[in-house]
Image: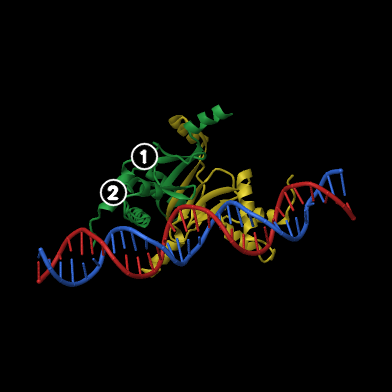
Chain colours: A green, B yellow, C blue, D red
Amino acid sequence: MKRYSRKREAILEAIRSTKSHPSAEWVYAKLKPEFPDLSLATVYRNLAAFVESGELVSVAVVDSKERYDADLSSHAHFICQQCGDVSDVDIHGSRELDKLASEYLGAKVERHELIFRGICHNCCENSDIAG
Amino acid sequence: MKRYSRKREAILEAIRSTKSHPSAEWVYAKLKPEFPDLSLATVYRNLAAFVESGELVSVAVVDSKERYDADLSSHAHFICQQCGDVSDVDIHGSRELDKLASEYLGAKVERHELIFRGICHNCCENSDIAG
DNA sequence: AATGCAAATGATAATTATTAGCGTTAAGGA
DNA sequence: TCCTTAACGCTAATAATTATCATTTGCATT
């Protein structure tokens, strides 16, 4: 039977509170002050459970670290190759695409993800100054 | 100065020889018989160098393992969530998309990747038999 | 309120892909 | 042939994630 857990709730809320698509480590650091006895394992455990249950989505792995998103609407992402920042791109993927791919492959296509890569606005400016 | 290396050539050729989008480990296993003194570190080193130089592309990380592609044309991929198989989907991404995202973000968008996820044809059939 | 069961947790050891360090080998210009 | 150093093999190190297990705690039942 599934039981209530204040920490679990806080972990979900932490992801929901930001558009930065955080990592497990980020969540841990954010909640540690409020929950001094929080264990990193609990963060990993709950994040995995939330992805499993569909309440969170894994967006990408950036610098070897998995990044999560609580925004379940179909949208694209941009990843800065310099600073690792992950941001939303409001281009909505159509179910049509999944259908197209499904017919092409003869597979059961459940979803797709669209990821742009490049250098973000901030990093562009900074390299301007440096260069 | 860059020097010739038979092993390096073989590593690139191994990736080029298949549409399976192999991992470093796969390349190592494939070449080990022909090069008994091949080191796994050499495979990793050369794969990273090829990605750096643009001769290979990193497609995705599947089951914690990085997967490579020698097909540099812009195309999408499908990843089976059951068996980890990675296959091509001949939907070509347009430069228009990158431009759109670039304007949306004010960033320098270099490329994008489109990844479909689901259950591949084979795994669908097998689960039919099993169920 | 006390009790009992199993879910949830904390702490930490284990796992594992990848990278770094370092001494050796060998490509290829002089 | 000699010399420089790129490329290599070997292996230790790194680091994110997972597994293990003893303890804690939510909550249904008494």
Decide: few, some or many residues near mark 1? Use Cα within 10 Å; few <14, some 14-19, many ≥20.
some
Answer yes or no: is residue B91 visible.
Answer: yes
Looking at the rendered image, the quarter that the N terminus of chain B falls into is top right
> At x 40% / y 65%, what residue is drawn?
B127
Foreground: disc 2 or disc 1: 2
Task: Give the residue pinned by disc 2.
Answer: A10
Q: Quadrant of residue C9?
A: bottom left
Mark 2 and mark 1, same subunit? yes
Q: Which residue is mark 1?
A: A19
Q: Is residue A85 left or right of residue B34?
A: left
Q: Residue furthest top?
A: A129
**Residue at x-position 74% and y-position 49%:** B3
Front-most of residues A92 and C12:
C12
* Residue beneath the point at 46% across and 32% down: B100
Residue A121 screen position, x and y as percent: 47, 31
Q: Position of residue B76 (x, y in %)?
A: 50, 46
- Chain assignment, label 1: A
Q: Nearer the viewer, residue A102 or A93?
A: A93
On-image quarter of the C terminus of chain B: bottom left
Q: Mark 2: which amino acid?
A: Ala
The CA span between labels 2 and 1 is 16 Å
Residue B11 vs residue A107, the one in the foreground: B11
Q: Chain of mark 2?
A: A
Residue at the (69%, 54%) spot, across then down:
B8
Callout 1: SS: loop
| Residue A85 - label | none
Mark 1 residue type:
Lys
Is mark 2 in CB contact (under 8 Å) with mark 1? Answer: no
Q: Earlier in the sequence, mark 2 or mark 1?
A: 2
Q: Which one is in front, B12 or B18?
A: B12
Asked which quadrant contains residue B38, the reply is: bottom right
